[in-house]
């Protein structure tokens, strides 16, 4: 063995037990008591948790948006991920009009290759669903990209697909075992509200929230869920932020349909009150945070298993871009979160908000399973040695001065985190140890993913 992690409490999604973990050639080769090998490096995890590395299902690196580009690329974004205990990141490759999915994927691979600290893949975003593009989806699944995303919003930005296009994409993804992810908001209602507010000179961040009230997301969510039910097609709704969409997802799940929900820490921790703060513009994201009733409903869904995955929707912009004296529609949408996502939900588990097993489920095992990362998501013999060692007895406060992203502020400033990640390993390689980066840029590899749907 190359490494033995001894004396820790292994915590997976559905079990916890005390044992040693043996690693050889980047793979977990054995789990048991009193493992010994005179040549192996010994890592003592006594009184600590041994967890699977986080699987981030939703990040946006170097994405052009609102006349600028999100400030984390594959290097800085995956560096921050490693410090946050995340060992696999899925971001997005957006199809340009007229471009094939094959060209889109190859361009994204070239952008990431030899630049990442952790393993990675991406979802393909379809913006131009021609017959030729739809015909490519089965081949992309076979190449290891079994997930597609579409927008029901960003109509003026040219990202949206219409209802008929959405239905055709759903039929195709169902037929070839791909999982369709959807951003659900109603663009026409948003544009109507936005125009009305601007005409009255109402331009602050508060009106970003009012232009996207709960029902705007819920109405779109109900529509696409009904379409998926009619086809019995798997569907994954990203960054669920409101109680009504969550209720519709719960109903579909209870009726036996493969409808999956993702939410984000910002929707669990903040409410629409943030849009009344002096720094409200820094919280501008879509969908925005909603009321306390939605926050409570999402927490209930996290606890009972209705939420399948936790994503960060990491899409940060610099303070000068967020703080610019501009009307709310011109402030770039997006916030940071890739470094705080996994540690946030683990901290909440230590505080007692949910079980630690459930935190591991939505932070690692759930997204690994849904998006076909077969060798990720659990501390298990034969899986990649993607492991986080967490000290539950150490607390700290989140601070921009201690972050590892390229963004120059954080909306999580001052959040008290229970539990400290002391070591992150990916495929047996120590990425971060006691707050020090150990890995070399380029260590991360493209993950070949597999269909997880019938």
Image (spheres, helix red, strand yellow):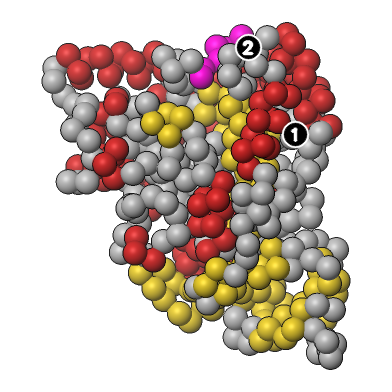
Query: Residue 312's x, y, as percent?
Result: 50, 47
How many marks can you see?
Answer: 2
State which quadrant residue 360 falls in: bottom right
At x 67%, y 44%, the residue is: 113
Instruction: Compute the Cα span from label 1 to label 2.
Output: 21 Å
At x 77%, y 79%, the residue is: 3
Query: Residue 328's x, y, as percent?
Result: 26, 29
Kindly report which numbered mark, 1 or 2, lies closer to the viewer in this rendering: 2
Provide the residue designation for mark 2. 98
Q: Quadrant of the N terminus?
A: bottom right
At x 67%, y 79%, the residue is: 9
Provide the residue designation for mark 1. 146
Query: Residue 400's x, y, as percent?
Result: 34, 60
Is 2 situated left or right of 204 in this image?
right
- Find the magenta span and give its range: 159-165
Q: Residues within 10 Å of mark 1 (few under 14, many from 20)?
A: many
At x 68%, y 37%, the residue is: 109
Res. 241 visible in picture: no
- Residue 92 within the magenta-colored segment of the rendering: no
| Residue 136 to residue 217: above or below | above
Q: In which quarter of the image is the C terminus?
A: top right
Res. 422 visible in picture: yes
Extreme residue toward the left, this view:
201
Q: Foreground residue, 352 or 322?
A: 322
């Amino acid at each position: 063995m190359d490494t033995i992690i001894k004396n820790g409490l292994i915590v997976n999604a559905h079990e916890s037990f005390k044992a040693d973990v043996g690693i050889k050639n980047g793979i977990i080769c054995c789990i048991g008591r009193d493992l010994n090998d005179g040549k192996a490096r010994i890592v003592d995890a006594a009184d600590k948790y041994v967890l699977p590395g986080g699987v981030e299902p939703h990040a946006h690196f170097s994405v052009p948006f609102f006349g600028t580009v999100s400030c984390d690329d594959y290097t800085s974004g995956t560096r921050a991920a490693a410090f946050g205990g995340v060992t696999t990141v899925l971001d997005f490759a957006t199809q340009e009009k007229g471009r094939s999915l094959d060209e889109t994927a190859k361009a994204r691979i070239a952008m990431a290759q030899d630049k990442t600290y952790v393993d990675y893949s991406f979802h393909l975003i379809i913006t131009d669903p021609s017959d030729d593009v739809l015909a490519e989806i089965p081949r992309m699944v076979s190449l290891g990209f079994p997930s597609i995303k579409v927008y029901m919003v960003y109509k003026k930005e040219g990202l949206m697909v219409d209802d008929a296009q959405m239905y055709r994409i759903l039929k195709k993804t169902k037929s070839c075992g791909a999982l369709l992810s959807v951003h659900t908001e109603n663009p026409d209602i948003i544009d109507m509200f936005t125009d009305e507010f601007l005409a009255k000179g109402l331009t602050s961040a508060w009106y970003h929230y009012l232009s996207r009230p709960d029902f705007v997301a819920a109405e779109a969510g109900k529509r696409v869920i009904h379409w998926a039910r009619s086809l019995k097609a798997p569907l994954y709704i990203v960054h669920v932020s409101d109680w009504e969409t969550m209720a519709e997802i719960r109903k579909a799940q209870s009726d036996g349909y493969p409808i999956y929900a993702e939410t984000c820490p910002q929707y669990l921790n903040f409410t629409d009150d943030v849009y009344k703060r002096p720094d409200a513009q820094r919280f501008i994201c879509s969908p925005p945070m909603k009321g306390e009733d939605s926050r409570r409903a999402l927490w209930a869904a996290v606890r009972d298993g209705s939420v399948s995955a936790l994503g960060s929707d990491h899409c940060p912009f610099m303070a000068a871009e967020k703080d610019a004296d501009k009307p709310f529609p011109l402030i770039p949408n997006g916030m940071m979160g890739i470094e705080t996502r996994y540690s946030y939900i683990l901290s909440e588990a230590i505080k007692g908000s949910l079980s630690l097993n459930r935190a591991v489920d939505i932070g690692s095992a759930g997204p690994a399973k849904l998006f076909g990362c077969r060798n990720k998501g659990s501390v298990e013999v034969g899986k990649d040695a993607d492991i986080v060692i967490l000290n539950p007895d150490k607390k700290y406060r989140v601070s921009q001065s201690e972050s590892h992203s390229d963004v120059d502020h954080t909306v999580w400033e001052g959040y008290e985190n229970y539990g400290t990640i002391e070591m992150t390993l990916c495929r047996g390689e120590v990425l971060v140890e006691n707050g020090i980066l150990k890995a070399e840029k380029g260590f991360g590899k493209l993950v070949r993913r597999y269909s997880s749907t019938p």
